[in-house]
Image: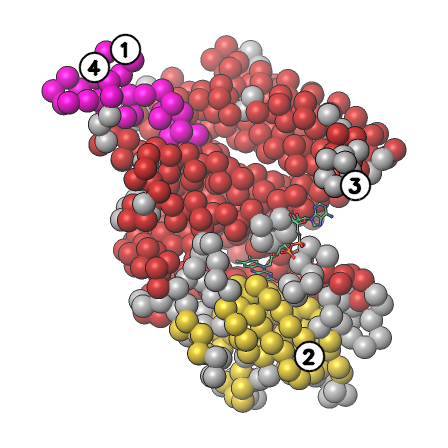
Amino acid sequence: MATYTPPLRDMQFVMHELLNVTADLQAMPMHAEMDADTINAVLEEGGKFAADVLLPLNISGDAEGCALDITTHAVTTPSGYKEAYKQYIDGGWAALACDTEFGGQGLPLVVNQCFYEMMNSANQAWTMYPGLTHGAYAALHTHGTPEQKATYLHKMTSGEWTGTMCLTEPHCGTDLGLMRTKAEPQGDGTYKITGNKIFISAGEHDLADNIIHLVLARLPDAPPGIKGVSLFIVPKFMVNANGSVGARNGIYCGGLEHKMGIKSNATAQIVLEDAVGTLVGQPNKGMQGMFVMMNAARLGVGNQSLGLTEVAFQNALAYAKDRIQMRSLTGPKAPDKAADPIIVHPDVRKMLLTAKAYAEGGRALLCFSAMLLEKEHNHPDDKVRKESGELLAMLTPICKAFLTDNGHISTNACMQVFGGHGFIKEWGMEQFVRDNRINMIYEGTNTIQSLDLLGRKILGNNGATLKKFGKLIGALVAEEGVNEKMAEFITPIAILGEQMTKFTTELGFKGFQNPDEVGAAAVDYLRVAGHLVFGYLWARMAQVALRQIAAGNTDPFYVAKLQTARFYFAKLFPETATAMRTARAGSKVLMDTDAALA
Ligand SMILES: Cc1cc2nc3c(=O)[nH]c(=O)nc-3n(C[C@H](O)[C@H](O)[C@H](O)COP(=O)(O)OP(=O)(O)OC[C@H]3O[C@@H](n4cnc5c(N)ncnc54)[C@H](O)[C@@H]3O)c2cc1C
């Protein structure tokens, strides 16, 4: 079975030494009293919950899966899931970063982000049950009426009720404008909703007393396409005036999907038959509310892959130190043994360091992004709120797609470290690969994220946000440009920053003449942009480590950080050259291929 040690030291490094989050948090009235000790203490306890309660259920939950009773439509989660969920609620974990007005603890989002990383490492499929609730909570918190908030948010904050997002239908996933589910106004402020949704994560289960579905549907007079989609709250059980759970609503699970990974999360086919719902936000403006949920979920999905990258790395590292096979090319390193541990082999180290660099870089990016989200919502300065929101909008598709692609690379590399044993279930490594695979698909496939990044977030505003990110790099270059020790980290990002401006302008120009050029280049572009962001964060991490070492700090943590930074820039960052080259190969080699694809 896989083991897991919460990476608390690295989380503390990212939050307190790299990002200095407490200073930023204290500038916001709601977090004025926040300090590092509180953050660290909460995460230490959260790590215990992940490692002690969730991890032991990961392999058994995968083997057992969920069961549907087709006569009652009830779904039973694997053994131990219900008890773990009760512990989660009793421990107050559901309320961690929720609004105190609705019973939340009001802790910073970055704390919740790190807590979720640990839960994802321990058991991604279980973590999706409470995880979906956070997105639904955010959508209702932003777009719900006071009455809707009063009815639902307390119970969602406590975790007594969970949430879902119901977008996908059998014929429409990416293109939600094709949606058919209908909502008929009843004249009393409610709607009767009828249709079929598929692939709904945590769509039915036995963990909570009620499930609050956020459903996209069409009103009778809705314009065609995405501009005619509205958002509704459809509870599994109606809610009585006193807040208690009432009659069963016409929304139920008609089937469960059998799938490659996350087997213990119920992926439900949801049938709506005259289900009673209420409108969230304005008619035909459903995507506004749903985007709040989707953006939260996109960061959450990147966090799922970060969790899997970390746990896969930890297990592969332990195995590589223990497994002996062959001798080192430079002579025996463990002459007392029949062979050397495989960690002596350069390529085994490359696989391990790939996962380590992607995990630590991903953690830095997601904590950086969680702070932007916090500032966007809670900073007293309008300008900070606006700029944080703009930068986060650009980083969101990178968090989703770059981190999940990196998770795919990393979990596969870590499985490879185990040789044939990685392919055998009992080690848990093949499950990490399988579980990670969906992260590249749902919440908008990684191709769609790339189009969002290049088309909307970069070219859509003439590269204005990219230029602002470039200023962060420029400031670091100005600060460290003459420091010889930083040259190996600063030079690559300074060069890529300049190349990126030219590359983006070139793609914009080509895309203006032929939109397929954007489609052909977008996935490669996102890899380049992801490395630009990672490069910036890795350079800053190297800067912190170098300063500590120069000040005489002998903690090996800083040497490790520096070595990982060097590996990242030498072995992973150069992918940008290939990606720019393939992006520049253009669309003709793809679109002028009817004979090849006949
Ligand atoms: C396990 C699981 C859990 C899920 N959970 C949820 C959930 O909780 N709620 C929910 O609503 N949905 C959920 N989904 C659905 C998921 O979000 C969709 O599967 C995903 O968005 C892709 O939609 P699709 O499957 O219809 O693929 P399609 O939209 O049919 O896409 C097929 C392929 O075409 C590509 N493609 C499509 N359009 C373009 C384009 N314009 N340019 C380039 N390429 C394009 C896609 O990238 C993809 O590779 C889940 C799915 C799974 C498998």
Crowding at mark 1 (Cα within 10 Å: few <14, some 14-19, many 20+): few
Q: Regarding mark 2 in the picture, which secondary structure is present there? A: strand
Please, what is the three-letter code of the amino acid marked with disc 3? Gly
Nearest the eye: 398 or 413: 413
State how far apart marks 4 and 1 are (Cα): 7 Å
Does the magenta portion include 335?
yes
Q: Which residue is mark 2?
A: 193
State how far apart marks 3 and 2 are (Cα): 35 Å
Quadrant field for ligand 1: bottom right
Residue drawn at x 47%, y 47% is 436
Seen in the picture, residue 394 relative to 586 is either above or below; the reply is below
Residue 460 marker: 3
Residue 579 relative to residue 33: left or right: right
State how far apart marks 1 and 2 are (Cα): 70 Å
Residue drawn at x 88%, y 33% is 513
Q: Regarding mark 4 in the picture, which secondary structure is present there? A: loop
Crowding at mark 3 (Cα within 10 Å: few <14, some 14-19, many 20+): some
Residue 332 marker: 4
Q: Which residue is mark 1?
A: 330
Q: Regarding mark 1 in the picture, which secondary structure is present there? A: loop
Foreground: disc 3 or disc 2: 2
Q: Quadrant of the C terminus?
A: top right
Sequence order check: which comes first, mark 3 or mark 1?
1
Foreground: disc 3 or disc 1: 1
